[in-house]
Image (cartoon, rainbow, N blue to C red):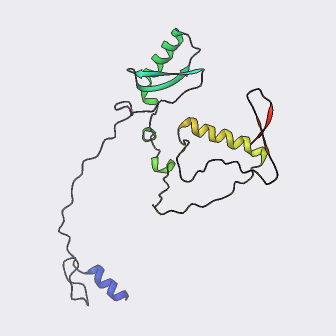
């Protein structure tokens, strides 16, 4: 085996392989030259964004035109302060990212995922686990941060998420609060 390997390594590339009747396959395909794609930043081609309702103390401001490059600022700012803030943000537009692909060194495949489902999928039910009360607030804050950053978003029509249903126990009743803040039995 070592002698065969030695013959292969020392033989001419165009000569037949030792102890073989066939020649090595020839590669006639030419190498194709591809032009490098330049990815335009979101400042050059702003993405179409869906503006969501903001809390009462925040508002949208746009760095270009009436609906391009949105930023969220405080409503309580005076007009002079708003103008100064927008001027600074406009001068540093390249530092703000509107898409994950704008973050240099961050591969979008690293921080996004897809759940591929087939048409004949079968739903699996898992009961909710209890969370340690000490960790519950930490988890809630982390999820809120991810929601605010836009890395996750609520999905209302997912087949994986079911609505909450009230299932009364036999021989019991449910009490709810009415418009006058009084407790009444739910029928």
Residue at the extreme bottom of the image, as rendered: 19
Identify which residue, 158 or 31, lies in the foreground.
158
Q: In this view, does 167 lie above or below 43?
A: below
Q: Does the magenta stretch include residue 42?
A: yes
Residue drawn at 46 percent across, 30 percent down: 95
Please count the marks in the image: 0
Magenta-drawn stretch, dominant element (helix, strand or loop): loop
Q: Where is residue 77 in the image (x, y as percent from the top left)?
A: 57, 13
In the picture, residue 135 is in which quadrant?
Answer: top right
In the picture, residue 93 is in which quadrant?
Answer: top left
Residue drawn at 42 percent across, 27 percent down: 69
| Image quarter (top left, top right, bottom left or bottom right) of the N terminus | bottom left
| Image quarter (top left, top right, bottom left or bottom right) of the C terminus | top right
Residue drawn at 59 percent across, 14 percent down: 76
**Residue 95 appears in the figure:** yes
Residue drawn at 29 percent across, 45 percent down: 37
Q: Position of residue 150 (x, y in %)?
A: 53, 38
Q: Is residue 118 magenta?
A: no
Q: Find the magenta span and give its range.
A: 35-53
**Left or right: residue 116 compared with residue 57:** left
**Left or right: residue 51 compared with residue 4:** right
Identify which residue, 91 or 10, lies in the foreground.
91
Q: Position of residue 183 (x, y in %)?
A: 81, 34
**Residue 107 appears in the figure:** no
**Left or right: residue 143 compared with residue 131:** left
Residue at the extreme front of the image, as rendered: 187
Q: In this view, does 23 lie above or below 69?
A: below
Q: Where is residue 56 in the image (x, y as percent from the top left)?
A: 60, 21
């Amino acid at each position: 085996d070592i002698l065969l390997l030695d013959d292969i390594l020392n033989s001419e590339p165009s000569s037949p392989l030792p102890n073989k009747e066939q020649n090595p396959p020839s590669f006639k395909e030419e190498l194709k030259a591809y032009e490098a794609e330049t990815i335009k930043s979101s400042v050059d081609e702003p993405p179409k964004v869906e503006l969501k309702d903001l809390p009462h103390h925040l508002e949208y401001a746009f760095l270009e035109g009436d609906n391009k490059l949105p930023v969220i600022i405080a409503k309580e700012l005076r007009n002079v302060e708003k103008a100064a803030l927008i001027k600074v943000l406009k001068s540093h537009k390249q530092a703000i990212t509107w898409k994950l692909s704008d973050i240099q060194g961050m591969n979008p495949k690293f921080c996004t995922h897809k759940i591929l489902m087939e048409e004949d999928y079968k739903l699996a039910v898992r009961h909710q686990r209890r969370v340690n009360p000490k960790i519950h607030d930490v988890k809630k804050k982390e999820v809120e941060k991810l929601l605010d950053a836009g890395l996750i978003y609520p999905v209302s029509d997912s087949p994986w998420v079911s609505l909450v249903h009230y299932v009364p126990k036999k021989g019991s009743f449910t009490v709810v609060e009415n418009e006058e803040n009084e407790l009444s039995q739910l029928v």
